[in-house]
């Protein structure tokens, strides 16, 4: 292909990828659905613009570097605090769960397709990986609780690495051109090479970011470029030593730098997020375009059986085993069991393996002669058949899981009721963001709505979910999730806007609780006459000053910058507490957590030891930050 045509093709794929991302955001579905559809339309089975010869021998290198960026970006977002949301489940998902997926898928492939055991285990290894490329876009439109998201994201990052390395090791048993050797030793050699390379590169990048002058004025840009170069170097150096060790290196470097105190972290995350969207779109579209329909549909009934086994048997089983004893609800476990779409690692590695198998088959055919000719031709035919089975099975699982599990993830989550009710704050100024910080800290699912671009960017950089638009527009409120909102807060600096937001939330969306900020104290009465719970800015300031004067210890404790102390009101939903007196419930709470108020049917009182707790009561807990959080989980495990 001429250089001009190749440039036009690459630019077209990237443009389609951007359009796909815009459509996905608009329609609230994972963008990967559009990538796959675009690849099929552009490929030989469609318009024929993208063919195996389009990129020549450069495709493996392009895919490899793209995978490095994608894996690094996903790992960079895997924060230590996030991992602590569900550490036990995350560890089991990437160990016990991965083994169940590996062995279970291999058995399903062997029984359904009648393949050799090496090929079955190769497919099983590849299909262990879910990956951030598919999980992250789904979680962007399905805002589940942090513990669910943390477990799924950790599984995706780690299993991408282990699946790629395991597949390379198992491939030695399938490809006669590969050298033999100890499989377990080979696995750990590749993993170790990747981890060491990733740690070394992360250490160098960290040192440069922290202690070297990156040119004042251009430091944020240089920091972004330095981190990008580090991701690519880690991948390339490790891969040069051991095939697919680069995936482990990129993941290791990403996790280390993402959890280190590096400067310009927000700029780095934003830059790498945009870059990842571009390379992800390009790789998915390019790889899907290389898929032949006849390969996909060969033995289609047996392959469908594999898909069903993977999605409806093996995945739910491994999730059930991995989440035993954790604080996931039954609905959350079912949701996680039905959410296991496969992503870029199985697609890219399966494609490259198939290319290598077909090349080996052609080499054997070319050398076939003499008395062994028939035997050599049969071996070459078998290798070509295995390549087709590998790509066809892996891509059918990818297509099916992405379309059905990814495409219907939100509907499944809504049916199972695993999306926590949202808190919508209209107004992304200092008041709105400060409130969002407090609500997010206690586990609420917060979305900020604002029509000011600077305020939107600031809120996004602080990690909040944001809907850009006029909060007095019902369509904007709907897009922010008002139909599934428990609380709407009108916190802009315009009282007229706050009043209109409150009226829309109450009348059009029937929100449970609506609060409004009154900037002018003379407007408080008008707000309250309409049934809106109103907070006067001037009165709030007066209350805060009065607390500092009359109750300085309590005020300082509640407003400590480290959030050492906390007070929270929580509804009783734990049936084990129903009918028990306060004297029994109190000792069940963690150390440093006390019950200070008891509310039932609107009547609030300081509880006595003999007062009983019933379902639907509200308890106000006071104590240390962590103690109150644990107490809330005990009282309301949902």
Image (tube, helix red, strand yellow):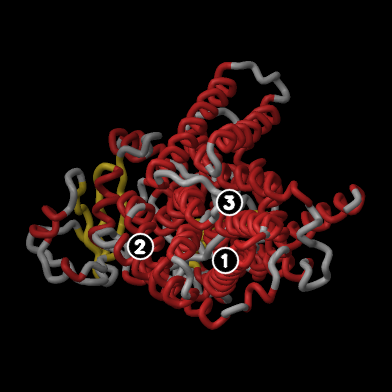
Q: Residue at x 38, y 53 (%)?
A: 94
The image shows residue 430 at horizontal and vertical percentages of 56, 43
* Residue in front for this viewpoint, 361 or 154: 361
Quarter holding residue 566: top left
Q: Nearer the observer, disc 3 or disc 1?
A: 1
The residue that disc 3 covers is: 520
Marked residue nearer the N-terminal end (2 or 1): 2
Label 1: element kind? helix
* Residue in front for this viewpoint, 195 or 606: 195
The residue that disc 2 covers is: 100
Q: Residue at x 88, y 53 (%)?
A: 1
Q: Residue at x 22, y 61 (%)?
A: 598
- Quarter the C terminus occupies: bottom left
Residue 466 makes an appearance in the image: no
The residue that disc 1 covers is: 386
The residues bearing labels 3 and 1 have C-alpha atoms spaced at a distance of 74 Å
The residues bearing labels 3 and 2 have C-alpha atoms spaced at a distance of 62 Å
Q: Determine whether label 3 and label 1 are within 8 Å by CB.
A: no
Marked residue nearer the N-terminal end (3 or 2): 2
80 horizontally vs 2: left or right: left
Residue with the most extreme bottom position: 301
Label 3: element kind? loop
Residue 389 makes an appearance in the image: yes
């Amino acid at each position: 292909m001429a250089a001009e045509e190749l440039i036009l093709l690459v630019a077209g794929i990237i443009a389609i990828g951007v359009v796909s991302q815009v459509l996905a955001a608009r329609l609230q579905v994972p963008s990967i659905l559009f990538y796959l559809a675009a690849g099929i339309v552009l490929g030989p089975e469609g318009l024929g613009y993208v063919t195996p010869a389009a990129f020549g021998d450069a495709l493996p290198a392009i895919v490899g570097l793209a995978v490095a960026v994608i894996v690094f970006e996903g790992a960079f977002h895997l924060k230590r605090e996030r991992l602590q949301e569900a550490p036990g489940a995350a560890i089991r998902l990437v160990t016990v769960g991965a083994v169940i997926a590996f062995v279970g898928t291999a058995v399903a492939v062997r029984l359904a397709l009648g393949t050799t055991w090496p090929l079955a285990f190769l497919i099983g290894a590849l299909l262990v990986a879910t990956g951030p490329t598919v999980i992250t876009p789904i979680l962007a439109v399905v805002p589940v609780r942090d513990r669910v998201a943390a477990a799924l994201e950790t599984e995706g990052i780690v299993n991408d690495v282990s699946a790629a390395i395991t597949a390379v090791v198992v491939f030695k048993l399938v490809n006669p051109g590969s050298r033999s050797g100890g499989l377990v030793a080979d696995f750990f050699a590749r993993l170790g090479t990747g981890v060491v390379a990733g740690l070394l590169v992360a250490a160098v990048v960290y040192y440069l970011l922290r202690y070297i002058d990156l040119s004042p004025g251009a430091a944020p840009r240089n920091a972004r470029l330095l981190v990008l170069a580090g991701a690519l170097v880690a991948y390339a150096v490790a891969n040069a030593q051991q095939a697919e060790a680069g995936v482990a290196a990129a993941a290791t470097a990403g996790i280390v730098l993402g959890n280190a105190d590096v400067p310009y972290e927000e700029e780095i995350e934003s830059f790498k997020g945009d870059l990842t969207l571009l390379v992800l779109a390009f790789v998915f579209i390019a790889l899907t375009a290389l898929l032949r329909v006849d390969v996909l549909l060969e033995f289609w009934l047996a392959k469908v059986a594999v898909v069903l086994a993977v999605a409806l048997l093996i995945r739910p089983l491994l999730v059930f085993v991995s989440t035993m004893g954790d604080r996931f609800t039954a609905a959350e476990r079912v949701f996680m069991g039905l959410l296991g779409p496969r992503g870029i690692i199985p697609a890219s590695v399966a494609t490259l393996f198939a290319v290598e198998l077909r090349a080996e088959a052609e080499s054997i055919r070319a050398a076939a002669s003499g008395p062994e000719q028939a035997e050599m031709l049969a071996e070459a035919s078998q290798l070509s058949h295995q390549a087709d089975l590998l790509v066809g099975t892996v891509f059918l699982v990818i297509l099916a899981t992405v379309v059905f599990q990814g495409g219907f993830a939100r509907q499944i989550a809504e049916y199972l009721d695993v999306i926590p009710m949202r808190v919508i704050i209209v107004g992304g100024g200092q008041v709105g963001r400060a409130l969002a910080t407090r609500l997010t800290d206690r586990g609420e699912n917060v979305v900020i709505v604002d029509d000011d671009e600077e305020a939107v960017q600031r809120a996004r950089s602080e990690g909040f979910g944001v809907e850009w638009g006029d909060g007095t527009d019902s369509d904007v409120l709907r897009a922010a999730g008002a139909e599934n909102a428990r609380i709407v807060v009108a916190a802009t600096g315009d009282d007229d806007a706050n009043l209109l937001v409150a009226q829309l939330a109450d009348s059009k969306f029937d929100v449970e609780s609506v609060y409004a900020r009154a900037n002018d104290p003379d407007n408080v009465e008008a707000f309250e006459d309409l049934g809106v719970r109103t907070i006067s800015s001037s009165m709030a300031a007066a209350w805060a000053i009065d607390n500092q004067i009359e109750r300085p210890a309590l005020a300082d404790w509640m407003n400590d910058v480290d959030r050492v102390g906390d007070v929270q009101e929580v509804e009783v939903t734990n049936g084990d507490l129903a009918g028990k007196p306060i004297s029994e419930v109190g000792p069940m709470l963690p150390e440093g957590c006390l019950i200070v108020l008891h509310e039932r049917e609107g009547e609030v009182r300081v509880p006595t030891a003999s007062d009983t707790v019933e379902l639907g009561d509200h308890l106000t807990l006071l104590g240390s930050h962590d103690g109150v959080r644990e107490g809330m989980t005990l009282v309301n495990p949902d």
